[in-house]
Image (cartoon, rainbow, N blue to C red):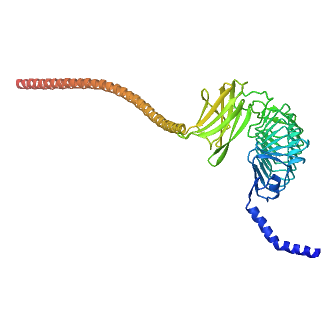
Amino acid sequence: MKKGIAILFAMLFLLFMPSLTKWRMLATANPRVIYVPTDFPTIQGAINNAVSGDTIFVHNGTYYEDISINKSVSLIGENRDLTVIYGLEAQYVIYITANDVSLWSFSVKSNALNPYGSGIFIYLVGNIVICNDSITDSYDGLVTYTSGGNQVSGNIILNNSNSGASSYFSSNNVFSGNTISNNGAGLNFRSSSNNVFSGNTISNNDAGVNLFASSNNIFYHNNFLSPIQVSSDSENIWSQNSEGNYWSSYKGLDSNSNGIGDTPYQIDAHNIDNYPLMGAFYDFNVVSGNMTYEVSVICNSTVSGFRYEIGQQTGNKIIHFDVNDENVTAGFCRLMIPTELMNLPYIVLDSEGEITPTSLSASNETNAYLYFTYLGNSQTITVISSKTLQLYQELSKELSDNQTALLADLDYLNAIYYGLLNNYTILLDHFNQLQNSYLSLNSSYQEHLSSYSENIQNVQNLVYIFAATTMVFLVTTVYLSRRAHASFRQKASNV
């Protein structure tokens, strides 16, 4: 009988298995949104009834449960501060053993009955997103064990007795924009390399960062404010694109006024930050159209109240933020703005009036880097990208270019004019020389002509004298001949 029933169930299973497989494929291809507590009263109940690809949306409330996530699902809390997961007796409040899991906007807290538990434990899986969560009051806030390709961003990790985040044998993870404070150690990494840490604030921990047998991790744009900042037995990287980290114990100078320290910061025997920041790093996301842009500020005052707007009438793009620090009487900001969000020219104002910013050499086609200073310990900074001013500057540039071209043409004409004038001067000099030569020759000619006239007159006179003499000679000769002939005839007649 039992054997027959078993055979019957086996036949039914074989009969309906294709339909079940098809249903699961359709469920995976068409992910659902499951609501807690509307659809299921507990988060674990929703996970148990979900399939990979589903999203579980958890409404505000306190959920006393230990959660095991063994499917590729997304868990989203309605509000980080009001959607609380309070662990019971398990070692981990949230235990993740599936790839491709997202956990957003929860407050995760451990029960005091489990003093050595973890808020979130990621075990032997990857591609996990832990974002915008509050992880507090555990032994370890977050633990990754043999896990890679994860993103831990925008979380608040506080009051965990051993560490804010611990990592064992895990690589290629990204930790960004987290606030890690009041823990035993901010970060505790063992045998974990090639991870990236950026934009984190690590403050008031018993130790900032512990790195054991962990090398080639990249740290940049982090704010290290703990008394003991880094303990490491291996070499890591402490800057990117010539910008490092802010160290509360750094005492270097910034003589070239670019927000980067002149001298490196020696972390320990193995590590050095060649580009320490002179102020804390702040990172803000700006949504414009369908794009999200990152605007960063390095400032020696506290930056708050960041906001972005577009002028309704002018179309100007405007950034506002407040800077406050009672201990600062003169502050500075190093501002990075994506040029796609706000392009040149920039107008910078504080509460007193206009500030002249310096465009830093780091500026390129993608990002503009501005440096400016202000007086006072409390100011509202406004940065405006003006279309009108841009058009004015473009017109001024065009006029300037035209003026430059006209001046170049004028210089060319002047060169030709002065060349002709020089040639005219040379010709005039030659003319004067020729004229002087002509006058000299003419004077000589006149003198020669006068001499020639005198000579002609003398020749004429000689001719006249010669003619007269000849005439006298002829007359005398004729006369004498006649006298002689007459005398001869007379003598002949006398004979």
- Whether 377 is drawn above or below 269: the answer is above
Could you tell me which residue is drawn at 74 percent across and 58 percent down?
32
x%, y% of residue 54? 76, 57
- Total labels: the figure holds 0
Please give left or right for residue 383 compared with residue 100 in the image: left
Could you tell me which residue is drawn at 63 percent across and 49 percent down?
290
| Placement of the N terminus among the 4 image quadrants | bottom right
x%, y% of residue 247? 79, 32
Q: Quadrant of residue 359?
A: top right
Could you tell me which residue is drawn at 78 percent across and 44 percent down?
133
User: Is residue 389 or residue 469 the one in the foreground?
Assistant: 389
| Placement of the C terminus among the 4 image quadrants | top left
Could you tell me which residue is drawn at 78 percent across and 65 percent down?
24
Q: Quadrant of residue 470?
A: top left
Please give left or right for residue 245 compared with residue 410 in the image: right
Residue 270 seen by the camera: no
Which residue is at the far left?
493
Residue 454 seen by the camera: yes
x%, y% of residue 119? 85, 45
User: Is residue 233 or residue 26 the one in the foreground?
Assistant: 26
User: Is residue 230 or residue 260 the one in the foreground?
Assistant: 230
- Whether 99 is drawn above or below 370: the answer is below
x%, y% of residue 317? 59, 39
Q: Quadrant of residue 354?
A: top right
Please give left or right for residue 5 compared with residue 102 in the image: right
